Image: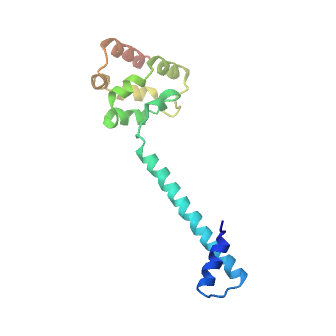
Amino acid sequence: MYTFQQLIADQLIQEKVEMDQSAMLSLVGGFYDKLVSDVADKVLAKLAQQQESKPAFDPAALAGELDYRRLADALAGQLDYAEIAGQLDYSELGGEIDYGSLYSEIDLCDVASEIDLDSIASALDLSEKIREEIRMMLRSL
């Protein structure tokens, strides 16, 4: 199996080019750097493509914490509403609010007053019982 150095040396011999060892090593190093750079570029491009193909909002990300801005974006039409409805655990959300483990910089009262529950509930096709549970939770804020 050829090494880079042998491959380049053979090419230089075929072209009848004389080169000292340091120049040849420099050429081999340049070839190797280019190879590594090309591979790295392809890997980074592939990662960027995979990142772009992911949805802007992942309901599974709600499991540990709730980002109100992303939730608002999702409810504004960037996500299939049925997907959110199946992922939200309202009792867990209530517990997170009660224990204050959600982002402290968000004023929960302001958030609650800006939520148009009826339009969200209609979009999500929520039952009246679930709507009432959400109303009670929001009032407790």
Rendered residue at 63%/73% (across/down): 7
> Horizontal and vertical percent for residue 129?
34, 11
Residue 106 vs 138, above or below: the answer is below
How are the colours assigned in the image? rainbow
> Horizontal and vertical percent for residue 5?
67, 73
As rendered, which of 86 and 135 lies closer to the eye? 86
Quarter of the image with the N terminus is bottom right
As rendered, which of 86 and 15 lies closer to the eye? 15
Q: Hey, which residue is sitting farthest top in the picture? A: 129
88 vs 11, left or right, is: left
Q: Give the image quarter of residue 40.
A: bottom right
Rendered residue at 28%/26% (across/down): 123
Rendered residue at 60%/72% (across/down): 31
As rendered, which of 40 and 130 lies closer to the eye? 40
Q: Hey, which residue is sitting farthest right in the picture? A: 21
48 vs 124, left or right, is: right
Rendered residue at 38%/27% (across/down): 84
Q: Give the image quarter of residue 14.
A: bottom right
> Horizontal and vertical percent for residue 23?
68, 82
Quarter of the image with the C terminus is top left
> Horizontal and vertical percent for residue 93?
47, 22
Residue 129 vs 30, above or below: the answer is above
Residue 101 vs 77, above or below: the answer is above
As rendered, which of 106 and 133 lies closer to the eye? 133
Residue 137 vs 33, above or below: the answer is above
Q: How many marks?
A: 0
